[in-house]
Amino acid sequence: MAVATWLWFLKMKSNNMPDQFYIQDWIRIKNGRIFTGEKLIFESTEKNLTCFLKACYDFLDIKYPKFHKMDGLSKLGILASEPIFNKYELTKETALVFSNNASSLETDLQFQKTTNTFSSPSLFIYTLPNIVLGEISIKYKLQSENAFFISECFQADLLKDYTESLLNLGKAPDVLCGWLDLQNGEYDVFLCLVSKEKNILFSEENLKNLYYAENEKPTH
């Protein structure tokens, strides 16, 4: 094969290879603690969910009055997003890809109770899980792609595939993706920022390792 032809072949092969992406940073909120990356930044013994969320809000020094009117899932979304958006210069194209197990069940049950007397419009608007994506988008002025998936458990392959599709198609320069679950007052939050900035390789295995650092690995 001629040198010129060989160089052309290598160039075309390189152009057709998918880009490599990395976990630039991640946030973990579980068991009264907030981690940014591997660093513990906040810890509380508060068992009441409302009080814990307020303590996190005060610690992160968020100035956003609308926060106090949100449901628990949206509050968790804002709390987990705040350190990322404060630390990095993200654009309005930053995409959001979330998932959980319980959907908006926590708020659904609260709303159902109000129907016995007078249905609460302020609760009703939060009876869809993707409302948290809207709240984050409003707070951080995003005009981007977003998706919220419901799955039985943390699915690293789903998050990886969908996130990479957005990045490879040029739909977003970076993606905040992960797990945002709230059930019976128990919260489990893991969000990571994915981009081309080199750090931890964005892989299914690494997603699982970071998530299960604070969770028991499944037996199946």
Image: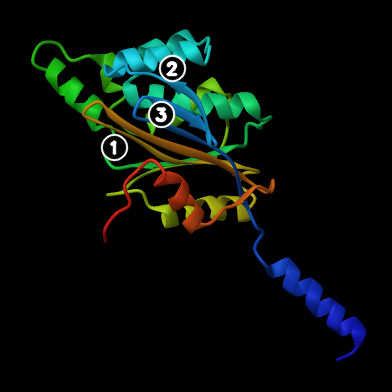
Q: Earlier in the sequence, mark 3 or mark 2?
A: 2
Residue located 86% across and 78% down the image: 7
Give the residue type at disc 1. Ser
Q: Secondary structure at mark 3?
A: helix
Q: Secondary structure at mark 2?
A: helix
Residue 70 lies in what quarter of the image? top left
Residue 196 lies, with reference to residue 47, above or below; the image says: below
Q: Which residue is mark 2?
A: 56
**Residue wearing tag 3:** 132
Q: Distance of mark 3 from mark 2, alpha carbons?
A: 17 Å
Q: How far across and down, in percent of the image, does residue 189 sit?
A: 40, 34
SS class of the residue under badge 1? loop
Q: Position of residue 68 (x, y in %)?
A: 39, 11
The type of residue carrying mark 3 is: Val
Q: Which mark is residue 103?
A: 1
Q: Quadrant of residue 53?
A: top left
Q: Label 1 vs label 3: CA separation?
A: 11 Å
Amino acid at pointer 2 = Cys
The residue depicted at 19 percent of the width and 21 percent of the height is 110
Task: Indicate left or right for 138 with 5 as reference.
Answer: left
Bin the neighbour count of mark 1 within 10 Å (Cα to Cα): few under 14, some 14-19, many 20 and up.
many
Q: Nearer the viewer, mark 2 or mark 1?
A: 2
